Structure formats: C-alpha cells, structure tokens
Amino acid sequence: MKEKLEQLRRRVQEINDLESILSLAFWDQATYMPSGGGEARARQLATLGRISHEKLTDPAIGQLLEDLREYEKELPADSDEAGLIRITRRMYEKAVNIPSDFISEFYKHQSDSYHVWMKAREENDFEVARPNLEKTLEYSRQLADFFPGYEHIADPLIDYRDPGMTVSVIRPLFAELRKQLVPLVEAITEKPEVSDACVRQTFPQDKQLAFGLEVIKRLGYDLDRGRQDLTAHPFMIKFSLGDVRITTRVKEDDLREALFSTIHEAGHAMYEQGINREYEGTPLADGASSGVHESQSRLWENIVGRSRGFWNYFYPRLQKVFPGELGSVDLDTFYRAINKVERSLIRTDADEVTYNLHVIMRFDFELDLLEGRLAVRDLPEAWRERMKADLGIEPPDDKTGVLQDMHWYQDMIGGMFQGYTLGNVLSGLFYEAALKAHPEIPSEMERGEFGTLRRWLTENIYRHGSKYTAGELVERVTGGPMTIEPYMRYLRSKYGELYEL
C-alpha cells in the first residue's frame, strides 16, 4: 500500500506543478504583463486549467484512491498519510463531476472578464461589464448543478473555499453579527469625528515600501522565500512553500493603504510559509480554508498591526522615516487615526467595525443572484439601497459601488466573500486562545517581539496546512464550535475605549 500511496503522491505533485505555473501566469497578469498580452494569456490559462483538470480526473487516480480505501481506514485519522488520501479524494470527487471542456471555457471566460472589468472600472460604467457578469452567473449556476443534492445552490460553491461551510451555517452567523454591528457603528458614528489628517499627508512611495518591508520582516515574513511587488488589487500567491509572494498598492496621500495591505498579505504569506515543509507539492500544502487564511491576514493586520502595543514599538521608527510629517504628531493621535471608524464606500478601505457589513452585503447578494431573486442588471441599485440601509451612505458611481471588487469579474459568483468575515470571526477566536496560552504576548509586542505569537499560530494552525477543516481546527484549539463572541468582545473592548462608549 505504501507504494500506491507514493504513486498517488507523485501524481498529485505533477498536478501541483501545473497549478503553480497557472498561479505564476496569473501573478504576471496582475503585476507586470503588458495589456496587449491579455488575449493570449486567457488562452494560456484555459489550456493549463484544462490539462490540470484532465490529470486530476485521470481514472488512474480514482483507482489508486479506491485501492487505498481500506488502508486509509487503518491509519490514524490525524496522520499525514490519511490526510493526503482524504484531501485528494475530496479534490478528485469534485473534479470528476465537472467536464474538462467546461473548465477550459470557464477559465477563458474568467480571464476575458477580468480585462473587461478593468475597462469598466476605468470608464466607470457597469454596463460594460454586465454581459460578462451575466455569463459568469450562468457558469456559476452550472458549476453548482454538477453537484446535485445540495441544500442551497451556493453550498457547492462555498465548499471550494470553505470546506464544511454551508449557507445554513453561515447565514445565521452573519445575521447575528450584522444585528450586533449595525448599532455599534451607529453608536460610534454619533461620537465626535476622529481626525485622520496625520496619515493623509504626502508620504513618498519608496519610503512607504521600505518601512512596510521592515515591519513584516520583524513579524516573521521570510524574504528568502518571498518578495513584494506592486499591483492594482493586493494579493498573496504561492508557487511553492519556498516561494510565497505578496503584492501591495501605494497611495502617497494615505499612509494606511500600503502599510496595512502589506501586513495583511504578509499574514497570508506567513501562514503558507509555516506549513510543514514535508507537505510540499501535495494538496496538504495549502491553507485549511479561505476563512482560516483570512483569519491570519486580519489577525496580523488588525489585532496586532493596529494595536497600541504594536505602535509603542514601531511608531518612533516610523517618525524617523517621516520626521517632517509625523515628528510632531503624538502616538495617541496617530493610534486614533489608524483606527478611525467611519461610514465608507470601499470594502478594502473599511475599518474593523464597518468592514463586515460590506462583506455580509456581498454574501447576501451572491445568494440572491444564484437564487434568481436579484437580476444582474439590478445589482447597482440593490447595492446603493443596501449601503444606505447598513452604512447610511450611497455610492455616487459604479466604480465606488458594484465595480470595486474584482472577485465576481475574475472568478465566479458564490463562495467568494464569506471567507473575509469568517476570517475576522476566527481571528478573534484564535487570538483569544493564544492569549490564554501565553498572556505575555501583548507585553512582548510592545518590545517588538512577535515570536511567541507566531510560534503558537504555527504549532496550532500553520503547520497543519489543509489537513483539518476550519471547524476541526476551531475544535482542536478551543474545544468548542465557532462563535462570534470572542471577536465581538475584542471589538467592543477596543472601540469602546477609543470612543468612550
């Protein structure tokens, strides 16, 4: 049986190599590829996607999995071998339900749609992107229908990024979160407005990037196994456990943009860099889910990176980089500025308190679109109405409304956004568990020491890769189910003090 397991490992490693080249092609498309390469790149991505899918659905893999079925039952459920067989079987059983031609068509459409979205954003006109988005909705429904027997049409799509999560689990969790967040936002925004003028000065790009790299190196991002580049929409991407890259974007008139997107993406990257190196080239060498992945980016960006203790250490260093801009600004003023709560139009610019209302809205729209209760043509108006209801503001145009996120325009509709809010919920839960194990973490952060927290996260989350689902990780770490309470305790404590609630 060990020989068959090794055969399975060799086959999935070949697929992983193809997927890595696919990722490299996407990274190039999103960073430095000239615009004239778009048509050919769409074809290339479609070809690689089809070949990868055909290799994954090879009957030989199905036979190996069948041959290993009894052997898997004999293994401890938490062993690496059992995990490899289990995760590969899940991938295979999903893939064999989808025709290769569909995969090729969908890849090509997604690449084409991405370039149309960029044009639509530039022209600030949703109608430019609408036909492609309507086609994306058709593809998304078709993809879900390859998995009959679902309770909700979004469930198979959610399962791609958050295995084990379903609409029946997420919808009530998000409803309760929204119920608690809306009055919290109202209470905060009734208070006198906090000034963020100190971070809205002119900060040269090269100095911002250099300081951001200094910060993430201190946090633990390994630049021998990573690098940072510029892009329109920041992301982390992995080609191997030895090559985990991040991207950022810079606004010279807002210090927060590059700094916190750099910390955010480094959080994703440190997760990948912390995976057991023996998992290289296998399906285990991935994050557990989009929600768990996002928990790490948000934990490092917000719970750590926007904390008072963090800036007790880093602020004097930042002042030395920008003495003219920040030399006379005290820490309290700066700390309040980077944690300012306000009703904002753009999800990626949103503060911790309002951010999840942006995400929950998108999740609800995905369900409405898939269920047929909302037509794509009516999406801009629905967007305006929901923003007004939840945040009290309306986008004046498409660019700051329905066109602001690339997700639906370069991927699918369904399962695209829930991970962001699940990640916030999990960030609070995991950090609270880390503090119970190591109460010294906050005082260490004030000295610029992050090793204890990073080691705890590595031991309890990172090293396991995708071996456990989000629910299983939560159970292992906390001994109970997922809950919003640790996250809400964190928000109420921090912002209650900041805004004297």
Image: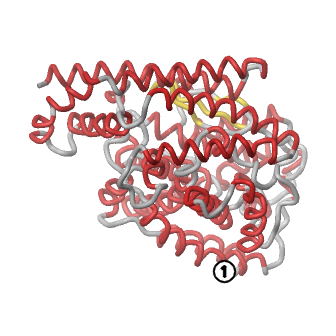
Of the 4 image quadrants, the one containing the C terminus is: bottom right
In this rendering, the answer to whether 395 lies above or below 450 is below
Q: Nearer the viewer, residue 364 or 500?
A: 364
Q: Which residue is mark 1?
A: 183
Q: Nearer the viewer, residue 18 or 430?
A: 18
Residue 435 x/y as whole percent: 43, 61
What scheme was used to colour the molecule? secondary structure
- Helix, strand or loop at label 1? It is helix
Position of 287 relative to 469 (above/below): above
Can residue 297 be seen at all in this image of the molecule?
A: yes
Q: Residue at x 74, y 62 (%)?
A: 383
Q: Nearer the viewer, residue 108 or 493?
A: 108
x%, y% of residue 6? Answer: 21, 21
Q: Residue at x 31, y 42 (%)?
A: 467
Quarter of the view holding residue 207 = top right
Q: Position of residue 139 (x, y in %)?
A: 56, 42
Which of the 4 image quarters holds residue 67?
Answer: top left
Q: Quadrant of residue 433?
A: bottom left
From the viewer's perspective, is 370 left or right of 463?
Answer: right
Callout 1 crowding tier (Cα within 10 Å): few <14, some 14–19, many ≥20: few
What residue lies at 86% left-to-right and 36% top-to-bottom? Answer: 204
Pick the quarter of the image with the N terminus. top left
The x and y percentages for residue 131 are: 73, 42
Left or right, 17 with reference to 89: right
